[in-house]
Each structure stands twice: as C-alpha cells, then as structure tokens.
Amino acid sequence: MRIRLRTCSWLAVLLFACLLKPAFATEERCVNTSGELLGAILLAVDDDVVIRVVQGTYHLDVNPLDLIDDPSFGYTISIIGGYNSLCTSRSLDPHLTTITGDADIVQLQTYDSVNIDSIRFAHIAGGLWLEAVSYGGSGPDEKVTLRRVIFEDLCTSGSCNGVNSGGNAVGINSDAVSMSHVVAVHNAHSGCALHVDNHDLDDVFLSYSVVADNAGDGLCITDIQFADDDYRLHAENNVFWDNAGGQDIRTRVSPHVILRNNIYHVLDASPAPITSPIGTINQDPAFTAPASSDYHLQVASPAVNSGTLLVSNPVDQDLDGGPRVVGSAPDRGAYETNVDDTNTLTVTTTADQVLPLITGSLRWAMTQANGDSGLNYIHFDIPGGCPRIINLVAPLPPITDRVIIDGYTQPGSAPNTNAIGFNADICIGIRGDLSDDYAFRIPSSVSASHYLQLSGVAIGGFDTAAVDLQGGAGSWIHGVQFAGSLGGTALGNNAVNVRVAGSTTYYNWIGGEENADRNIIPYAWVTGVLMLATHANGSTVQNNYIGTSASGIDAAPNQVGMQITGSHHTIRGNLISGNQTYGIELAGTSALDNFIASNQIGQKSFSFCLPTCSNPGLPNISHGIYAHGGAGDNSVNSNSIAWNGGAGVRLVDGQRNSLLSNRIYGNEALGIDLNAAGVDAVDNDAAPGAANLANRGLNYPALTVAEGARREGHVRTLFVSSNGTYLVQLFSDTTCDAAGYGEGRVYHSTSVATIDNASPGSNGSVILDIPVSWNNAPLGGRQFSMVARDLDGNTSEFSHCAAYTCDQIFGYGLDGSTADTCP
C-alpha cells in the first residue's frame, strides 16, 4: 500500500498557491521530442505533471513503468496535445499529435489520476494500459478521463496488452472512467478494443465516440470474478460498427447499463439492463471513408441530428474542435456535421414588457421559441458595454419546447477557464424584484422531449427559484452565476438557486466536467440546489461552487448547500462549503439511491503557504452531510469532508447508507455520528431493535494496537457483530478526535472480515491483523482508526484511536537491518 502526503516548499509558496489535496507541487512541461515526453511522464513519480505536447509524432519504444522501481506512478499524469512550438496555443484535433512506438505495452498507471486530451495513439505493438487507482489514500480524485483521443492500429504484435490477460487493445482500470470523443478503430487483436476493469468501478461515461472496424469486440466491462462490483455504465450518442468480434457492447455483473441514442449491431449484456436501451439505430452510419480512418459523417447519415442531449457528460465541441450541436439534436459519433435545421433568435434590448411584447427582448425571444416546434437558440447582441441588466417585470414565459439560451454570445462575454475558481466574464444579468417567482421554469406538464440549456447569465431576485425544472428532461445549466453582483449592480438573492422537481424530470445536468461548465451557487435563503425529483435515471450536479465566492476561498452562504429529497441523483466533484447549516442534507424516505462522490465539503478551493499552509477550512456551520427522516441506500464515497462545525457525516436514522474511502477530518464533532449525538456503544448487532437504528447501529471495530517499524507495521483489531462478510477500512491522522474516537485524514487500506461464529440472536467476532506501510513520513505517533461496512452498505462510526508505537525490536535493529528502524 502506498500513501502520499503532499507538502509545500517554503520558497515556492511565494509564487504558488497550495491546492487542497492537501498542498502539492505541479510540474508543467512543454515537450517536442520523444525523449522529453518520456522524461516528463517520469516526473509523475514525485509530483503531479501536466505535459503539453507540441504537434508532431512521438515514439515510445519502452514502457515508462519499466524505468521506475514502483509498479505505479504516484501522482496525476495529464497529457494534452495539439500545441504550437511554444505551447502558447493549441488545436483540439488529436490527429495532429501522435504517440506511437514498438513497446510491448505502454502503461500510464498511477495512484492518482490519468487525463489525456487531444492525443492519437497509433501503431503501438503491445497496446495501452491506463490505470488510476488509490492504493493508500491520495484523495478522492482517482479517475481516467479521455477527451478527443484516438486509438488506432494498436496491438500489432502477436501478444497484446500483457497487463490485461484478455489481450485487449486498450485496458482501463479506475474507480471512475469518463470518455468523450474517443475513436477506437482498426485495432488488430481479437480481444476488446476498449476494456474497462470493473473491480471497484463506480461509473463509466462514454459519449460521442466511435468504436468501429476492430478485429475483436467493441466496449467490454466483463470481469465476472468481481461480481459484487455494481458499476453504472452511461453510453450516449456513440457509434459502434463492424467490430469483427461479434459484440459491439459486452457487459457483465451490473444491470445498471444506460444506453441512449447509440448505433450498434449487437448488445451482449448479462444481466439485462434495468433500463431498456433508448433510440437505438441498427443502420450503417455512413462514415465518409472508414477504410482511410475518416469517420466523419456523410450528410445523409442516420447519425446526423439524431442524438440526444440527455448525456451524462455534455460537451460543447466535437473531435475537430467545432461546435458540438449544430442542428436540432447532436449528431451521433465523434464529429458534428453542419446540417442545421434550427432557428436563432437574438436579444437586442434589456427592455421588458408583458404586453405588447417588445421585439428583441428576452421575453419576446422565449415566446417565439415556445411557438416554434423545432430547437431554438437564443443569442444576445445588446448594444452598450457590460454588464447589461434585464430587469423583469414578471416571470418569463414557462418553457414548453426545446431552447438553448447562451449568454456567452453577448459581445464581451467569456466562459470560465480556471481549474480553480471562476473567472468568467458574464455580461447578461437577469434580475427579479422578489415578487417574481422564477426566472426560468419548465412546468411539470412538459414532456421529456423538451429541455432548457442555459449558460453565460447571472440571475438574482427570485422568491421561488431562479431556475425551476419541474418537467422536461435533459436540461443543462452551466456557466451560470446565481445571486451576488454583476459589474457593481446587485442582482439580489434567490430563495433557491436551482430546483429540480417533479417525477418526470431526469437526466438534468447542473454544471459539468469542463472548467467552463462550473456554476457559482451562493446566497440562497432556503437552499442552493434542491433535488426533489424521484426517477430511476436521476440528475447530476457536478463541478460547482456551492456556498462560496467565485474564488472558492470565502463564504457566500446558502442556508443549506444542497438538499436532496429525491432519488438516483449523482453529486460529484463539487466544492460545498461555507453554508449556514449543512453542506448536503438528505431528507426523508424518498432520499434513496443517491451517489455522492469526490466532493470537497467544508474546505476552501485552495490555501496559501507562508511558510506552512493556512487553515484550509471553510466550514459549513453544522454537519458536512446530514441524513434524517429515513434517508437510505445512499452511497457516500471518496469525498473530502473536513473542518465542518458539526459532524463530518451525521446519520440520524435510515439504513444502508454506505460510507467508503472518505477523507474525514478536522470536524468539530465526530467524523461519523450515527443515531443519537455522540459515540455509540459497541452492543449486540443481532438484537431485535438494531434494525431500527441508523445503519442498523453497526459496531465499529475495537482497534487494539498499531505498531511496527518506522514505515511498515501492522494494526490489530477485534471486530464484533452478527454473522456476515464485512469491509474494514483503515485510516490515520496526526491527531485523534477530542472524543478519543477517530476521524480519517489518510485512507490506508480495505480488508475483508468474515464472522461465522455467532449464535442466533448474538454477536460473533473475528480478529484482524492488517499490514500498514507508508513511504511519506514515519508512522510513529500517527493515530489509527477504522470503520466497518456490511455488504448491504451499512457503515459504522469510527473506532477509537490507537497511536502507532515503534516496536523496540525494530528500534534496536535486532532484526538484522537498520534500514527501517524507528527513531
């Protein structure tokens, strides 16, 4: 197991801010030779590395992992292609930057994340292996992200991809995999063109991609030995075609396979998907010249204008860098044609009047859009400088059709480009006077074929919700500022900034994966985001700042950051801090099956180091996550929950709320607090009343000893509970919670425990002896604690702390070696 705790150099902090992973250094390289590329990859042994690759062809004739001692790199690897010679500008087209070579295999395997953008991998003899898995707790960031990536003519050798025994052209292993505009074609081996390992897999997103003309199958997620890993696959607007293996999509283990508006011959899924595929076409996609690897679409292709906007990772540009949606719907596959069957309406005045309508006003444009059965774009070209404030005299017309409202078309506007913070130039402000219920609303009567896409505006002064999604499906709210001021003009606050309500509202997206998609969601006097909808295919809230300023450093509090009373929603990658009460509230028996992952809850976006990092806390005044009223079956995984004024996670009641691999530390109350406030007793988990307790009152392990050498040792615990199989996770911190029970700043490992000696109505027990190692600092004095989780998802509180002590046998070097002696 390996853990990396990043620290800031005292000298470096005069120039750089330290990010909250905790603080670390990022190496940035502009490369234009093969040797420079290999050398830059090897920097990921010690630091995050961002590699900007100049346009050209690069040869990797050696596997990078063969050049290091560790089986994986320690840090994030980002490889971004298409740059000019000085790396000051770039093209998004991956054909311009090719990585090739004769290596038996090329592995980009790290304990952190792998990000690849605008790169073509071609003619690599042994194929490609991409892995981003945490073996020791570098944080909630482990993910493989591919944008505009081509895999072509891989596996030219007899044995392909030795890491993956299936002989697949591209093998991927990570907790989360996000792929958009990926082209996998003409790969030679009879395995799968794209194979995703489903061990510990949470989500796979694949959209706007082409998997065609391969010697084997197309996309595969098929490791049946990991039958307990219930991943989710979201695949939309892809083209799978002429894969000689016989199956275009092959899945096993999980029924959560969501397929929308794809083209393919054969789906081989076992078990069958819970949700039947939607909008499938089994017709030749009519590529321009597939034999020559030209996978643009002919004008008459059935893929043209036949995709869906209900995508799990929406984007704005296609593989060439052109606009993603030109017509009434996106094209399927990696390229967008210029076939346009839409209407554009332009707002030219800030004036507003209900009757008679003022031509060129926003109200006029929305009325026109509702009256046109096709897709309408609303653009802005209002004379004068920024900002241009539209003061509404009444709520805008309810949205009853498809409309894309793009405030960034106003001259002087520009979306956010910062990975941390929000530097967008927003010129269009929409202001109510608190007698206006909403700015934008889709009524509950509107069918799922209609939606709102909204970007590039600032909205304030509405006493129900600024954006109220009661009906339709697939709306996308991105790059929007809620409340606050615009150019010195106060917009006013909203009761709720975004409300997703109604049983028919699903597949909505609040935010998105790109920097430009981030919303700023502050100052609501009820809640920043309210998720009321209950649907098997819920909505996603991602990459937003909820309760903070645009910088992410200061509080801009909502009363509640996010309240969820519905089901099946995904909350991923948000900064949720500074709110007046809770960061996230799960309320009521309908708050079920929500997935909360990789969020920062109670922290700042970054902190400065002078010479040590200042307190990175931006606490939610009460609990980080608060669940009550019977909320259950929710998954809270790989979040960083710190510095909050109450508990890190507070579960008053409800069952099967799973808490795995979270970094929970520095909170005023317990890290995890079940049932009544305070530490629960270790009692009889088989007692009749246990079923009525939060997470059935599952006992925490009785951690007894943590000892060994300076960097390697073991932790021993006695775990008492009813018969069953459990996961036991081990954490450590520099200090113990004031109550004497742990929190967990650093995640170390997960072990499996089985109890089979309990008599009916009583507990049994098992003793675990768990090895622990850490290369970052001496283990001596660290405070270790544990949590347990049963197979239904019920998770315990943290155990009491045990300070790591140095075994004197090692201390005196009596084992024959002093290489790892304690101080």
Image (tube, rainbow, N blue to C red):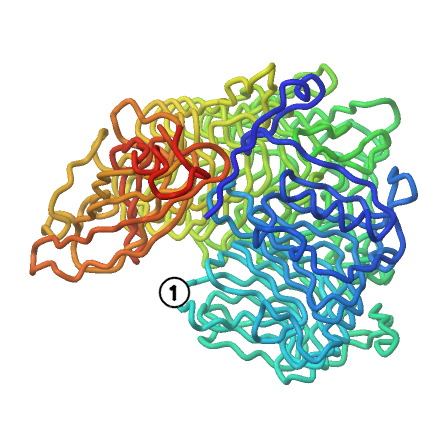
Answer whether residue 426 is visible to the viewer in this image. yes
Q: Is residue 263 above or below residue 519?
A: below
Say above or below: 746 vs 16. Answer: below
What SS does tag 1 mark?
Answer: loop
- Reading the image, the residue beneath label 1 is 228
Amino acid identity at mark 1: Asp
- Asked where in the image residue 774 lies, by quadrant, the reply is top left
Residue 472 seen in the figure: no
Q: Position of residue 555 (x, y in %)?
A: 54, 20
Q: Is residue 301 above or below residue 746?
A: below
Residue at 30%, 50% in the rendered image: 789
User: The C terminus lies in which quarter of the figure?
Assistant: top left
Q: Quadrant of residue 798?
A: top left
Q: Position of residue 477 (x, y in %)?
A: 64, 42
Sort mark 1 into few (<14), some (14-19) or many (20+) by Cα contacts within 10 Å.
few
As rendered, which of 695 and 532 lies closer to the eye?
A: 695
Relative to residue 285, is residue 505 depicted above or below?
above
Q: Residue at x 30, y 36 (%)?
A: 807
Front residue of this view, candidates 196 and 381: 196
Identity of the residue drawn at 58% across and 45% down: 74
Q: Is residue 154 left or right of residue 728?
A: right
